Amino acid sequence: MRILITNDDGIDAPGLAVLDAIATDIADKDGEVWTVAPAFEQSGVGHCISYTHPVKMAQLGPRRFALEGSPADCVLAGLHDVMGDLRPDLILSGVNRGNNAGENTLYSGTVGATIEAALQGYTAIALSQYYGPENRDLENTFDAAAQHGASTVRAILSAHPGGNTDYRLFYNVNFPPVPAVAVRGMRVVGQGFRRDTCFSAEPAHSPSGKRFLWIKGGPQHIKTAPDTDVAANLDGYISVTPMRADLTAHDQLVPLAKALE
């Protein structure tokens, strides 16, 4: 199997090394793992692409490239330049340091890479490691992802329906904030929503008097509704959420049409 990997934490991030090990396991000895990752951290950029300016790329080793762009840029670079006439069988993004569950999904550069991969017609999976008091002080804080990543990806691939729909399926995986031995299993769940918390902006001043804003996240351990990603993660389960990039509110098409008649 030929696999393209990327992330949003940057080419030197420890989570990318974890993902490389997962991809190498899945690709097997006859496969290939190609890496195109941001040269610098790109957390929170979502599905951004560098549409208005060129991006610089450097080769760091065999099948290993750093791009001064977003995760979605990295997917485009891998597919349309780096890999030449070769095509990946799978595109993986992560392993993100921190969860991309609930509303975080919409901001995530990790997930943004898989959106672009799906729009390009490829099977793609985003992987993220939730953090909490049970795993943040471990020697390997990616323990759950490292131990369960390959089996989770294989399980998804075995169930993936394939097909060539306009908006192809991609998958968002979050590993729970516990050591690998404490993972209780895997659940297929919807995207949750943390109520009463959101991103915000906090002003600050430099010693010279210049005004800045810090963008702040909200509490991450507020449970979402049952059978959704955050709730599953906080209960110790790996969450797997099938997604599409179609943003249409399908349940509102008929009511809105009737209202506008």
Image: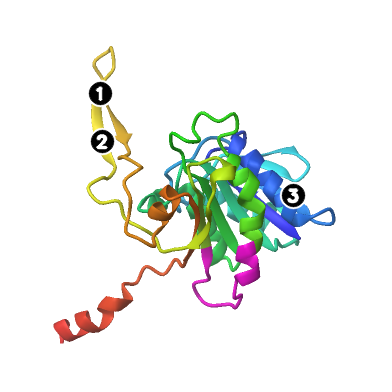
> 225 or 209: which is nearer to us?
225
- Give the residues drawn in magenta, as a range: 155-170
Q: Which residue is mark 3?
A: 24
Residue 162 lies in the magenta stretch:
yes
- Disc 2/disc 3 C-alpha distance (Å): 40 Å
**Element type at mark 1:** strand
Q: Which residue is mark 1?
A: 204
Which amino acid type is marked by label 3? Thr
Q: How many marks?
A: 3
**Element type at mark 2:** strand
Asked if marks 2 and 1 touch (Cβ < 8 Å), the reply is no
Asked if marks 3 and 1 touch (Cβ < 8 Å), the reply is no
Sequence-earlier tag: 3 or 1 = 3
Task: Name the residue at 25% across, 45% down.
Answer: 197
Which amino acid type is marked by label 2? Ala
Is residue 242 in view from this perspective? yes
Q: Could you say which disc has been placed on residue 201 in the image?
A: 2
